[in-house]
Amino acid sequence: MSLSEPGKSVKGNSEEDELSLLKERVKYLTQLNMSLERDLEFYKQELNKLLEPPYIEAMLLETLPDGRAIVKSSTGPNLVVRVSSNVDVSKLRPGVSVALNNKASTIVELLPSIHDPLVEAMEIEEKPPVTFKDVGGLEQQVRELYEVVGLPLVKPVLFQEIGVEPPKGVLLYGPPGTGKTLLARALAGEVKATFIRVVASQFVNKFIGEGARIVREVFRLAKEKKPSIIFIDEIDAIGARRVDMGTSGDREVQRTMLQLLAELDGFDPLEGVKVVAATNRIDLLDSALLRPGRFDRLIEVPLPDRRGRAEILAIHTRNMKLKDVDLDRVAAMTEGFSGAELKAVVVEAGFFAIRESSNHVTMDHFVKAVEKVKNRMEKKKQLLGTTHY
């Protein structure tokens, strides 16, 4: 048995340890270098973003056979531009938003659909939870509204087979508080359509052309969310009879109404968008709104009769704790009340019960509530000096 020299063995182990440490050091520096290169590339890209010129937003009007396109630039004029090879040409359709290179005026990117903030702020409901079960005393109006608006949305093929073109717009008219808005909202809930509610005065803007642009945006949004129902409340705010003379504000309102008429004339009634308008003053409306092809179907929403008032009271009290309450008798006491005023009666009756610390509502509470609401109505008529219309 031979023994190795002790000094040589120690020296060999020291060299191996040093080599191992150097390898680890090289590995660490390699990884560090890769990380720094990634950071460098990231900051180069960020610097390029900061230095590159901004894009111009434009709307595509038409594509040409030679591969170019006509766009309406947000800076003003229409331009004939080229399309970058990075853009999917199959997605270039009239009306889409595109980004133009500032230097070469080339379409370099397709932009997502952007809606005006004023339109987004409007009341938009996807499939409202309200249905015709929540509407009382308007059986005839419900049936007619469903036939001319609901059926074309649910069964457009039926109308195509028969060859009948349904009305594009329906006008609900009658005293305030009779349920015109509720009818339109319940219809949207019944057919599972998007409900877009806009008060006509929201179309009016102090800047020339803004009202017409908002009208176009509302119809564009409705087409994207179809099936949809556009409900224009108080349409007399923009649809009053046109006059020859007027202020610049009057002329702007008229331009807005003309854009609304153009939108009504320009869409297919079976494409999944319906327009329902409401007014308390049908006598003020311009005849151009009511001609065939626009709001040519008029549905009156009158004050409810006794049977209708009983149905409305039953709807509003279905979640209330009642004791010995005769709703038919309450209906007889509320002659001339609208649906909104009947709801006020139910709410007041509930408050009378709460004041007495009662856990249920009695007939006596309803009698007091009817008197209170009736006195309020009389005071309102005296102050306004007008009827419901």
Image (cartoon, rainbow, N blue to C red):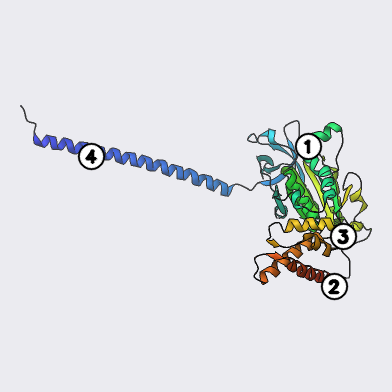
- Which mark identifies residue 250? 3
Label 4 neighbourhood size at 10 Å, few (<14), some (14-19), many (20+)?
few
Residues under labels 2 and 4: Cα distance?
101 Å
Of callouts 2 and 4, which one flags the residue occurring earlier in the amino acid sequence? 4
Left or right of residue 97: residue 46: left
Label 2 neighbourhood size at 10 Å, few (<14), some (14-19), many (20+)?
few
Of callouts 4 and 1, which one flags the residue occurring earlier in the amino acid sequence? 4
Residue at figure coordinates x 79%, y 36% from the top left: 156
Q: Residue furthest top?
A: 1
Does dot 4 land on a helix, a strand or a loop?
helix
User: Between residues 84 and 87, which one lies in front from this camera angle?
Assistant: 87
> In front: mark 2 or mark 4?
2
User: Between residues 26 and 191, which one lies in front from this camera angle?
Assistant: 191
Disc 3 vs disc 2: Cβ atoms closer than 8 Å?
Answer: no
Q: Amino acid at mark 1?
A: Lys
Residue 323, x across and y down, in percent: 70, 63
Of callouts 1 and 3, which one flags the residue occurring earlier in the amino acid sequence? 1
